[in-house]
Amino acid sequence: MELKRVVVTGLGALTPIGNTKEDFWEGLISGKSGAAPITYYDTEKFKTKFACELKGFNATDFLDRKEARKMDKFAQYAMVASDEAIADAKLNLDEINKLRVGVIWGAGIGGLETFQQEVLNFAEGDGTPRFNPFFIPKMIADIAPANISIKHGFMGPNYTTVSACASSANAMFDALNSIRLGYCDVVVTGGSEAAVTIAGMGGFNAMHALSTRNESPETASRPFDGTRDGFVLGEGAGALILEEYEHAKARGAKIYAEVAGGGLSSDAYHMTAPHPEGIGVVEVMKNCLENAGLKPEDVDHINTHGTSTPLGDVAELKAISKVFGDHAKNININSTKSMTGHLLGAAGAIEAISVILAMENGLVPPTINHTTVDEKIDPELNLTLNKAQKRDVKVAMSNTFGFGGHNACVVFKKID
């Protein structure tokens, strides 16, 4: 069976450094930090008092007030980003065959704020279970793609992938295969997350996963830097329209890039820590290249998982050196989490958008906040430090890994 070609025809981004794909890109290339003191709740007793929140976002600017109240933030974010991507793709919703349009979405946690609030309300009451009738529908992780499909009438495959921080990269790989195998003409894919809550921040603090650089939040996310002390939590959504190549061509769609392939693997090592030698990461990148029919020397740019954790950054760069050998020194490597923070289940989608826009603009966004060399990191690797670099990017890879050892990798190339 001959696999169908798959391309990207629409993008939507809702991020801590920009609430549209254009503003997101401008934030990336200018080296903007999205980190700031948390505004959602009182942080006085929390170890970490900052995060990468959305700025100036009001759901009712985009959604009917009544409908918005039925959604957790993570689902609101999904609706806004997917609407932007659908509009960007210029899909004619009156003519398209909606039976062949799927929605495959990623969320690592889902409606955490809704869950938190309902439990707190119960705990503060008299023991009578007075729960909101929308509690469960707002909380469940699969409700984001459900809401997207209900709004637009998309009747193809519809589900959520959950693999912690690899969730939206898993969703993109599933979307790719759904089109490759002929099940769909179009898939709305991506991911969303809204975990900047007392439970989210408290839980990650308890794991010692978050930076506590409270005196300088904007410099706290510092992947590859010798003084990094943990990741910075972010929120938002990224959406991509994947489309069968001939279908896109027939309607005269703008094509951003071809989805060349993807890969999956497991560390099979630890609940939260990466394998120190990155063996699962080596396998996922090899799988991705093989799936795409590409050679290591074809890759120009890698957006790393690069969370700014002491162990993870080193393990990933070791894996890149093993897979790409001497060519690793010729690759523009970066971590856009230095600016956006870590969007958990939305990270893969947001970072895929970054590499696609890098390809389109011939410019690789920087890894900001680097001031101190880490002697465990190969100094010959080009980590695109502190300033965007011009680069003709023909092939770009995005790495995304999750707690539990879940590894996902997607690679894009300029359309022939």
Image: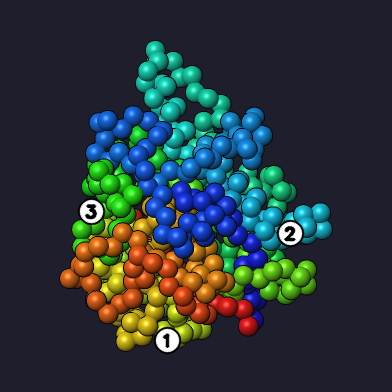
Considering every residue shown, the one lying at the far right of the view is 95
Crowding at mark 3 (Cα within 10 Å: few <14, some 14-19, many 20+): many
Colour scheme of this structure image?
rainbow
Q: Is residue 15 above or below residue 179?
A: above
Crowding at mark 2 (Cα within 10 Å: few <14, some 14-19, many 20+): some
Q: Could you tell me residue 282's position as x and y percent?
A: 34, 75
Q: Could you tell me residue 205's position as x and y percent?
A: 26, 43
Q: Could you tell me residue 293's position as x and y percent?
A: 51, 84
Given the image, on which type of amino acid does mark 1 rest? Glu
On residue 297, the disc is 1
Q: Secondary structure at mark 1?
A: helix
Considering every residue shown, the one lying at the far left of the view is 375
Given the image, on which type of amino acid does mark 2 rest? Leu
Considering every residue shown, the one lying at the far top of the view is 126
Q: Secondary structure at mark 3?
A: loop
Crowding at mark 1 (Cα within 10 Å: few <14, some 14-19, many 20+): some
- Which residue is label 3 attached to? 229
Q: Secondary structure at mark 2?
A: loop
- Which residue is label 2 attached to? 91
On residue 373, the disc is none
Left or right? Give the position of 338 relative to 140.
left
Q: Is residue 61 above or below residue 175?
A: above
Q: Could you tell me residue 257's position as x and y percent?
A: 59, 72
Q: Quadrant of the N terminus?
A: bottom right
Residue 411 seen in the current view: no
The answer to which of marks 3 and 2 sits earlier in the sequence is 2
- Residue name at image x 64 percent, y 40 percent: 62
Cα distance in 3D space between marks 2 and 1 = 36 Å
Q: Is residue 127 above or below residue 39?
A: above
Given the image, on which type of amino acid does mark 3 rest? Asp
The answer to which of marks 3 and 1 sits earlier in the sequence is 3
